[in-house]
Image (spheres, rainbow, N blue to C red):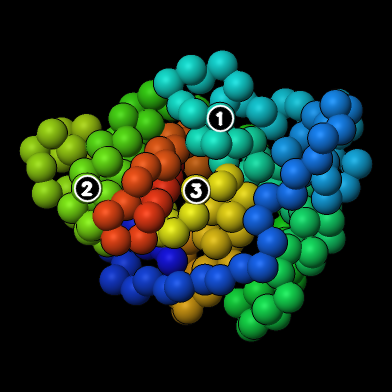
Amino acid sequence: MKFLLPTNLIASVFAFVCFLPSEKKSNSINLISPLATYSSEWNDAKYLKCNTASKANYMTSAEKDVIYILNLARLNPSLFANSVAKKYTSFHTKYYTSLIDTLLLLKPGKLLFPDSNCFKSALCHATNSGAEGYVGHTRSKDECKNKRYFNGECCDYGHNKALDIIMSLLIDEGVPSLGHREICLSSYNKLGVSIQFHNLYGHTAVLDFHY
């Protein structure tokens, strides 16, 4: 389940999204990419540049991987569609099939880079909304209002693994506008990610994007 906030627009719709597999695990020491278990092609050295958040020490490894995986999907949408998205779930809803179609036609996009102001914005909202069990984008505390820094925001609920978060937002099940998908694949170039405990759904991930 997730929420979005494109520029100057708050969406009031949210949806539950259930998937079969989570991120796959492997004991192989040769794995480089977080998507390597889906295809060895992702281990090509040219994709290492997608790991733009590797030195962003203010984020956890899972938060860094959200940026890493989203960059991989943006850099090679067709490979992501064929090697990851097509294997991710057996629930082939119209939202899922439209994602596959979109990715197969999408041209490579530019990379997202971590931004500390976006992160502070996402962290404050994720922490406070999680403690309150709140779902949505409105900042109730002045602290978070003052740290608000984004042009587009996605909030996901119920997932704490990077690929699950990305797939939830890209499939955008139950959101007719496909706003989360649009934000994730659009021309933003800065991103802050915070994954926190949520009092109602277990986990929340806030992604704050900026130009």
At x 79% / y 66%, what residue is drawn?
86
**Position of the C terminus by quadrant:** top left
Name which residue type carries label 2: Ala
Numbered label attached to residue 131: 2
At x 52% / y 60%, what residue is drawn?
169
Count the marks: 3
At x 65% / y 56%, what residue is drawn?
22
Dot 3 lies on which element?
Answer: loop
- Disc 1: which residue: 61
- Disc 3: which residue: 160
Name which residue type carries label 3: Asn
Q: Residue 179 in the image: x percent, y percent?
A: 46, 65
In the image: residue 105, left or right of residue 16? right
Characterize the local packing of mark 2: few (<14), some (14-19) or many (20 or more) Cα atoms within 10 angstroms. Answer: some
**Position of the N terminus by quadrant:** bottom left
Q: CA distance from mark 3 to mark 2?
A: 16 Å
Dot 2 lies on which element?
Answer: helix
Name which residue type carries label 1: Ser
Front in this rendered view, residue 57 or 5: 57
Characterize the local packing of mark 3: few (<14), some (14-19) or many (20 or more) Cα atoms within 10 angstroms. Answer: some
At x 43% / y 35%, what residue is drawn?
192
Q: CA distance from mark 1 to mark 2?
A: 22 Å
Numbered label attached to residue 44: none
Q: Residue 161 in the image: x percent, y percent?
A: 56, 47
